[in-house]
Image: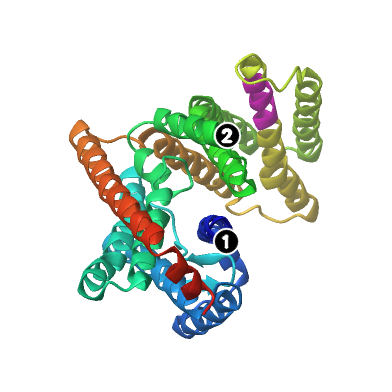
């Protein structure tokens, strides 16, 4: 009987983790119109759904802990002036708050991520006092679930809060987290942990390949700058030819030349492989050719073909040349912003990194203590905890 109770408790813990992690699926907000009323309604619906499986007391505790955790993120977002949607609860998926725009840098991301587990700690501290007052096993359960839930979320794997916090320090910490989780999964396989491992690996890999993506963006930005210079040259040529009787023929030559260059670039595409690092040089070359093909297409689409249509109709082209220049400038500015974001997003002073590290370790240590403390209380009151979960 004790063995079954222990097994049930373990499954319940894994279920809580799964619900919490699935609650990190922010994309669900794209499907929902969220407001304060929606938060309240979804909360009651979720309590009811959990109550059918775990009992109403356990359900209320779980929703309460999830709510306070998400409120921590919300307070942090408000402090950083990042607009956010109200919290929504989705039965058997958890709770989440959606940012309406991304953080400016990794410092803000770490700050927002830290808010969740910090408020998570505060959420169960009253239960510590109440347990010491009356010794009710119910409060021991609250302590353990609250501490374990938030401690697990501090594991250094993105997209968990812990991964978003230590991401400011070094992506190598993500790798350590992945190695630790992989070792645990080998010993004790779990579909939920395997899913976390996969998400964590892809996030780490994206960060690990940041240098390649940076080179690609720099290359794109440089090509737009070159196109701007060349565009000014041949736009002057076109303006000189504008009054000639064979101007349409000249435009056809420009259009045909652009098409021939596109065909040549297309034939030069290497497509020699997808292996990272080994084929990076060829990938960058192909990306350059692809960008040049796209720029030639823009030249035809925004300038040459419209200009020919104006001439054929006997109309003035107006500010067509300036419009094309503005399109190029806008695209170049977008790439410049992306480039700056990639270069500076994870930049932070040594002092900032030290503060983040100390706060992260301190919070993890406190949550670890209460997890062990709560687990000890759970072991002392196995039978009582089992009856609570059935209520």
Q: Which of 326 and 235 is in front in this view?
A: 326
- Say which residue label 2 marks: 187
The tag on residue 312 is none
Please name which of the two marks, 1 or 2, marks the residue nearer to the observer: 1
* Number of numbered tags placed on the structure image: 2
Residue drawn at (71%, 41%) of the image: 304
Left or right: where 390 falls relative to 238: left
Q: In this view, does 183 lie above or below 58?
A: above
- Residue 315 inside the magenta-drawn segment: no
The residue at the far front in this view is: 1
Where residue 264 sits: x, y (%)?
A: 79, 21
Mark 1 and mark 2: Cα distance apart in space: 25 Å
Q: In this view, does 11 lie above or below 302?
A: below
**Quadrant housing the N terminus:** bottom right
Whether residue 112 is visible to the viewer of this picture, yes or no, is no
The tag on residue 1 is 1
Magenta extent: 283-292
């Amino acid at each position: 009987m004790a063995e079954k109770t222990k097994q049930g408790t373990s499954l319940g813990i894994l279920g809580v983790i799964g619900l919490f992690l699935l609650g990190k699926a922010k994309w669900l907000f794209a499907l929902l119109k969220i407001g304060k009323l929606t938060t309240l309604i979804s909360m009651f619906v979720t309590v009811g759904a959990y109550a059918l499986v775990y009992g109403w007391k356990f359900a209320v505790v779980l929703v309460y802990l999830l709510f306070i955790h998400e409120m921590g993120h919300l307070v942090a977002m408000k402090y950083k002036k990042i607009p956010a949607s109200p919290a929504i609860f989705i039965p058997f998926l958890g709770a989440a708050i959606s940012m309406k725009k991304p953080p400016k840098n990794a410092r803000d991301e770490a700050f927002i991520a830290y808010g969740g587990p910090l408020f998570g700690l505060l959420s169960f501290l009253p239960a510590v006092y109440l347990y010491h007052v009356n010794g009710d096993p119910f409060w021991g359960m609250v302590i353990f679930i609250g501490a374990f839930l938030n401690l697990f979320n501090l594991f250094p794997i993105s997209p968990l809060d812990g991964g978003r916090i230590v991401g400011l320090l070094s992506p190598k910490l993500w790798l350590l987290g992945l190695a630790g989780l992989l070792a645990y999964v080998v010993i004790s396989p779990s579909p939920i942990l395997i899913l976390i491992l996969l998400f964590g690996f892809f996030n780490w890999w994206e960060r690990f390949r940041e240098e390649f993506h940076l080179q690609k963006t720099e290359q794109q930005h440089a090509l737009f700058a070159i196109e701007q210079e060349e565009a000014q040259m041949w736009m002057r040529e076109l303006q000189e030819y504008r009054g000639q009787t064979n101007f349409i023929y000249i435009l056809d030559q420009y259009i045909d030349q652009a098409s021939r260059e596109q065909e040549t670039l297309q034939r030069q595409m290497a497509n020699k492989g997808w292996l990272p690092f080994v084929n990076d040089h060829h990938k960058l070359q192909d990306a350059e050719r692809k960008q040049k093909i796209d720029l030639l297409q823009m030249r035809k689409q925004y300038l040459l073909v419209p200009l020919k249509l104006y001439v054929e109709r006997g109309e003035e082209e107006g500010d067509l040349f300036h419009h094309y220049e503005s399109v190029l400038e806008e695209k170049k500015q977008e790439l410049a912003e992306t480039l700056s974001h990639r270069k500076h997003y994870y930049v932070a002073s040594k002092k900032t990194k030290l503060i983040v590290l100390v706060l992260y370790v301190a919070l993890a240590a406190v949550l670890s203590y209460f997890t062990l403390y709560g687990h000890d209380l759970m072991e002392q009151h196995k039978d009582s905890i089992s009856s609570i979960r059935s209520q």
